[in-house]
Amino acid sequence: MIEIGVQTKNIVDDICPSNGFSLIKKSGFDCADFSLNSYLSNISLYSLQKNKFFDGTISELEQFFTPHRKGAQEAGIRINQMHMPYPNFVPNGSEDLNDYLSKVVAPKSMQICSFFGCSHIVVHGFKLARFLGSEEAEWNRMENFLSTLAPLAKELNLTLCLENIYSSIGNQIIEGPCCNVHKMIDRIDRFNDKYSAELLGFCFDTGHAKLVGLNFEDFITNLDFRLKVLHIHDNDGIGDLHQLPFTFTKNRENACSTDWSGFIKGMRNVAFDKVLSFETAPVLSSFPGELKNDVLSLIAKVGRYFSDKISRE
Amino acid sequence: MFSVCNLSGIIDVLRPAQGIADVKNVGFNQVMIEIDFRHIQEECQEVDDYGPYIKKYYTRLLDKCNSECIGVYAIRLNYRFGASLPSCSKISLLEIVSASLSALGTMPCDFLILDIQDTGYAKRGESCLTQEECICIANEVKERNTLILFENQYHDFNGNFIRGSFSDASYTRNFIDELNRLAGFERFGLCMNVGTFTLCGQNMQEYASSLGERIKSVILRDCDGIRDASLLPFTSSSGGQSHTDWLSLIRGLREIAFNGGLILDMKDTAASFSTLLRPHLMPLAKETAVYFRWQIELESILQKNKHIVLFGAGNMCRNYMKCYGEKYKPLYTCDNKNELWGTEFCGLEVKSPEALKSLPQNCAIVICNIYYREIEAQIRNMGVSNSIEYFNDEYMPVFHFNRLTRGV
């Protein structure tokens, strides 16, 4: 049976992480996507600010996360994926800041991932096409960065999962790094061949894909075995809302505006057998706290629905 | 490269005189005529009626174009099929193609643009017409020197836009190449519809770069990325920024040295303006089309002068030097800020504008500052008669990561 997972943000806190993991388990999930990116937010990075969290040594960081690991283990929740802080490069940032991100934050994130016994960490691509002039030039910079992480990834037996993300201009969302599936297949295969290991994989984000008109079935089918982890969520086609699947309609018939049937078909096509992981923290902040348990259960049930449909012949 | 005006929204097909005059008066001498397949099918009982109906419905417009020496650059057939394309509809399509071209009589028409989508195929990004059907259409236009252009589509999934037919660059490239191989010569190509790319958040630069010279035309239209509309470029914006990624388009068209038709499609803007305001709208429309051509061909301005100097020692000069400084090295730059005189900026000596008075006549002055008209007036008032060009850094091949800031 396909496992169901959810991101830890808005569920697991640092004061008593075991409570959050117990809730995840009770709600019907098997796994968790650990939101490591919460410890160094993109908002502060784009404001050219960083905190001291990743200044700690690996031992200090492991000590910090020991209660989290213990909480997950005791609750029977497997940390199947993690999210590296992003961005990994700030275009108008100083050399110091960008070096810190690539040489400190990224490797330490990978080590924390390994500490949790997790083998997949999601990495955002550099958003540099506008500055460097092309998507190819942007990928070349990204590939150089990934190459610096490759030896550690190999040592820790980790797969770095690239995610389809977006850029925006004038409040309008356009495709960003890793949205061309044909190019991504070639790049992932070439990188893995170079290092003779599965160091690169893909994280398919349904919400981001909807925002830039990607065909779910085609994208997933083309990715095939390279698809390692998921970020499942929904939106209105305008903003990256990270809401519950099936929430949004746009026509008189009130039919769902997201192609979940295409998602299911794609997953069937590739015989997906990993974790259906939901990236739905904003659902928990939009519903009142009194309904948190119910909302989480509903998310898990949607996951079971997907699992059932995908597995059905 | 030239500008073409889509007549939809601007003219009344049955009473075209005023609209054609509006178009001609601003300098458009080529137009695109749209034929709505569904309208034809609604008006005609039988497929055999299509030809006479089209001829009757469009004859006044075509006669007017002819008499006013307005060329028909393209006919665009648009239709959305709600289910898999039944064979009778494909026969209807061929009949409409034939009838449309027959209505033209001896008037030349460079392109037949197929804006046709079948939801069953569109979802897979494929063409809803087979190769054989495309070759049949090609045979209809065989006697004319008319190319058939496919157009990138979206698929409307319950109100949300998903990339549809011809949105996948590699599929489209292979499909067109194979058709041209079967035809024995270049009979097929592509028309890029900017608004459709915006609705699907797609990277136009990558697409253009992949398709290259197969792109024969570009339909310029703006929209907010949420609703399908055809607005005058730069009129859909928020937060001071356009909703359309014009940078991506211009970069892509520059990369492929695009030299085809820029078709201005502003039917919704035109329809929402009062006819009384039309004489004020049309000049702006024409200048907008000219502006795109100027941007795409920006480098040609630099190529035509053997020697140049710049005016401006700020961010625009910095961007010029980053992108073009090596290939088209200026002799120096000048600036009105006297504290900069005698200093070096991006490898150029900064001089006083007075230095322009000793320029040889074959040296052009390239203004690298947004206050173009003010600076041009300043130069002319100094008695300098050298050629003046405007440079613009809104759509550079590359950008610096940050902008210079200087004190007031």
Image: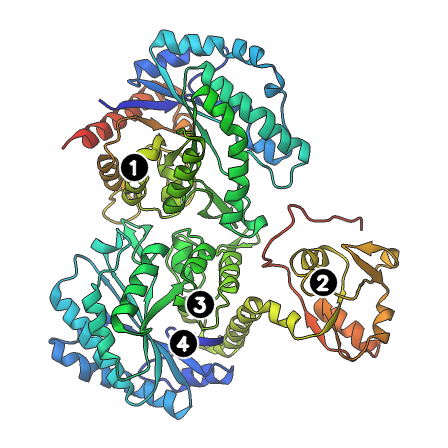
Q: Residue at x 44, y 67 (%)?
A: B269
Label 3 SS: helix
Which of the two marks, 2 or 1, is nearer to us in this view?
1
Which of the two marks, 3 or 1, is nearer to us in this view?
1
Task: Residue under label 2, please give it.
Answer: B369
Tell me whether circle 2 and circle 3 mark residues in contact (CB < 8 Å).
Answer: no
Label 2 SS: loop
Q: Which amino acid does label 3 sit on?
A: Thr
Q: What residue type is labelled 4?
A: Ile
Query: Distance from label 3 to label 1 (Cα)?
Result: 44 Å
Label 4 SS: loop
Q: In this view, does B134 lie above or below A97?
A: below
Q: Which amino acid does label 2 sit on?
A: Asn
Q: Tell which circle, 2 or 3, labels the residue nearer the N-terminal end.
A: 3
Q: Quadrant of residue B315?
A: bottom right
Letter of the chain that mark 2 sits on in the rendering: B
Letter of the chain that mark 4 sits on in the rendering: B
Q: Tell which circle, 4 or 2, labels the residue nearer the N-terminal end.
A: 4
Task: Residue under label 4, please give it.
Answer: B10
Query: Distance from label 2 to label 3 (Cα)?
Result: 31 Å
Query: Distance from label 1 to label 4 (Cα)?
Result: 49 Å
Task: Residue under label 1, please give it.
Answer: A224
Q: Residues within 10 Å of mark 2 (few under 14, many from 20)?
A: many
* Callouts 4 and 2 in the same chain: yes
Task: Residue under label 3, please give it.
Answer: B269
Tell me whether circle 3 and circle 4 mark residues in contact (CB < 8 Å).
Answer: no
